[in-house]
Image: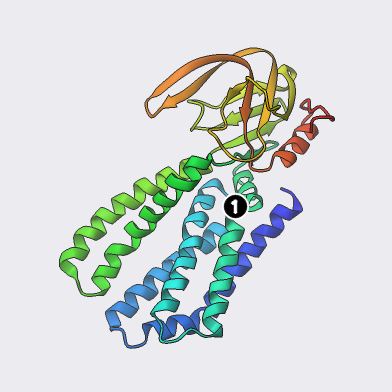
Amino acid sequence: MSKPDQIVGWVARVLWIVLALVSITTLTDALDGRSTLARSVVLGMLSVAWTGALVALLVPRTSSLTAARLIVPAGLVATVAVTATGSTVDVADITAITVAVAATLTVLSPWFTESWVDGSSYGPEHRLPLQTPLVLATTVVPLSWGLAVAGAVAGPLLLAGGNWLAGVPVLAAGAGVSFLAVRSLHQLSRRWVVLVPAGMVLHDPLALAEPQMFPRLAVASLAPAPADTDAVDLSGGASGLALQLDLTEPVELLVVKGRDRTETVETASLLFTPARPAHLLDRARHHRIRVPADRA
């Protein structure tokens, strides 16, 4: 793990702790005049969410990445909602929102992503995340995130308002919705390239039915993809610089073609898009994978 990746982790932790401190005034103002039940439920939900995110920020793992990306942005939404519910908007409110924005941008950054993905590495391997396909990043991700958060908070908020008739079934249904949405989001956290002493592994459940190992001696080159390439595209339409992996001889890939369909494709060239292409190429050189100097 590089020093910038370590630094961004500590920045996220500090911002999350600071958010709890600077939002006290905002929260107190928003809860003023509410019933004891409403105050208890809201404070309980916020305490559980804040503690859960703090644990996720203290333990760099792939599962923690999903939790942090779910809860920290929800903290921003909660801060805005609490500010809007209060009687006035003052400097404390603006400060809380600013800190929440900074925390959210930090956990969504590629440096944070790589640090948490690599936290699940074993021994000498080094995991580097793949870029989320653009169509998923703009549709499925925000929708799944919204369903996960709404499913978790809708029931308790209805109960806090004294609406037991609607609150109980919504609480039960919301738990199921949140579970499915979080599972969908976690699939996106489990996409990476693994650099190991023997070569590299492409682990992408969205593109491949099973992880694919490419021995170092079988790699002819790894470099930015040319514009006119005819390599098999496993990037899923992700934005950013795609890398082309050329092999010394064709291999068979079990490519995902639909929700329940796969297809065996034989190829000697394939494309994928890392979250940090230049960094991946640099790390690949350290693992003695052929990276042409004039194309890196």
Q: Position of residue 257 (x, y in %)?
A: 44, 24
Residue 21 visible, this angle: no
Left or right of 43: which side holds 69? right
Q: How is the image coloured?
A: rainbow
Q: Is residue 278 above or below residue 73?
A: above
Q: Nearer the viewer, residue 267 or 16?
A: 267
Residue 214 coordinates in the image, percent (x, y): 65, 22
Residue extending furthest right?
Answer: 293
Image point (80%, 30%), residue name: 295
Q: Which quadrant of the figure contains the C terminus?
A: top right
Q: Nearer the viewer, residue 27 or 257?
A: 257
Q: Is residue 280 left or right of residue 55?
A: right
Q: Position of residue 168 (x, y in %)?
A: 20, 62
Q: Tell me where residue 174 sits by quadrant.
A: bottom left
Q: Residue furthest front?
A: 228
Residue found at x 41% / y 72%: 81
Q: Residues within 10 Å of mark 1 (few under 14, many from 20)?
A: many
Q: Which residue is depicted at the point 27% across and 63% down?
A: 155
**Kind of residue indicated by mark 1:** Pro
Q: Is residue 186 above or below residue 19?
A: above
Residue 153 lies left or right of residue 207; in this view the side is left
Classify residue 180 as left or right of residue 211: left
The residue to which callout 1 is attached is 60
Residue 182: image location, x then y, percent: 41, 49
